[in-house]
Amino acid sequence: MSHETPASDTAPHSGAAPRGFAGAEALELPGWRHVYSGKVRDLYEPADAAPGESETLLVVASDRISAYDHVLSPPIPDKGAVLTQLTLWWFERLSEGYNGAAGAPVEHHVVSTDVPEAVAGRAMVVKRLRMFPVECIARGYLTGSGLAEYRESGTVTGLPLPTGLVDGSRLDPAIFTPSAKAEVGEHDENITFEQMSERVGAEAAERLRYLTLDLYSRAEAIARDAGIILADTKVEFGVDPATGQVVLGDEVLTPDSSRFWDAADYEPGRAQASFDKQFVRDWLTSDASGWYRASEAEPPELPADVVEKTRARYVEAYERLTGRPFEA
């Protein structure tokens, strides 16, 4: 079973042109050429560069929302701006260390936020990276697909866990559970660390595991200070061709790539109140939606109240974490 976070929309950092989300309608942006649309993001390269050869890309976060490998309708207003602004805030915080510790700055792919006016606030100019073909997931709490596997086998991606754990149990230390990236509309595949090593090489796999767990540990402490539990998160890495450095790509620590819970309401043994898109997932799998997840049917349109409440959760996550009012 896959971790219920979106597949990478930044796979084309390598210059390849994978199959994208056919339903996306990309904007025409002066100075940029559209090359790819993922579940949530649209990717552009400089119009004056040869295709696939530019050093930078423009990544635009749309308001589209995905769940259970489907892109849903309608979009969530301001979601793209929340994702982008929260990602930039996290990059800023993670470069500072934590609690006075001289944490090594997190190398990331952002070059500039000087973007076309039409996408201001929800786009970033980034380095073109050679992306690793895996998603790096850190889990500090047992829930979601990890819980489902644990109930069946006592493991998560092959890692044995203690008996007696329940929904929401803390995993201390946090565990690293990679997945293989899927094409849009297909299921991501949880893989073992050994399978990851076969895909990316043993040295790279060790490095990615270390970076992922270090980032999770630092971010979990920052979120906890804001009264939020970072239950798990998905990050992606690539290699900067100019330096050979392993660099963070995609978005980081947003409601789309992470599970955030209200610490004041935390109680193991039940589903937790979340600040992520679990609200949408719960509605889709409820009787109210009339949709059966195992069917091949497209999910129904999200009702207005679900859209409004989901937007409010995204904005609340941003404001609780950053301490800043959200400005679209």
Image (cartoon, helix red, strand yellow):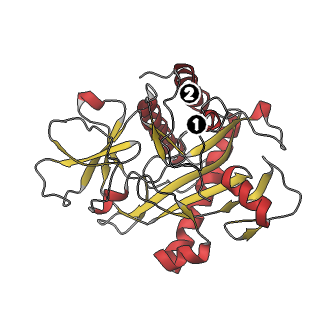
**Classed neighbour count for the residue bearing mark 2: other residues with Cα under 10 Å, few (<14), some (14–19), many (≥20):** many
Residue 161 is left or right of residue 127, and the answer is right
Q: Is residue 267 above or below residue 189?
A: above
Quadrant of residue 12 in the image? bottom left
Q: Position of residue 71 (x, y in %)?
A: 44, 41
Q: Position of residue 142 (x, y in %)?
A: 74, 52
Residue indicated by mark 1: 277
Q: Amino acid at mark 1?
A: Lys
Quadrant of residue 224 in the image? top right
Is disc 1 placed on a helix, strand or loop? Answer: loop
Q: Is residue 122 above or below residue 213?
A: above
- Is residue 99 something one can see in this rendering? no
The one of 157 and 123 positioned closer to us in this rendering? 157
Q: Amino acid at mark 2?
A: Thr
Q: For the N terminus, which image quadrant?
A: bottom right
Residue 52 is left or right of residue 274, and the answer is left
Q: Residue at x 26, y 61 (%)?
A: 15
Q: Residue at x 56, y 23 (%)?
A: 312
**Classed neighbour count for the residue bearing mark 1: other residues with Cα under 10 Å, few (<14), some (14–19), many (≥20):** many
Whether label 1 touches label 2, CB < 8 Å:
yes
Residue indicated by mark 2: 310
Q: Position of residue 108 (x, y in %)?
A: 42, 53
Q: Residue at x 30, y 66 (%)?
A: 241
- The label number, if any, that marks residue 184 in the structure image: none
Q: Residue at x 27, y 59 (%)?
A: 17
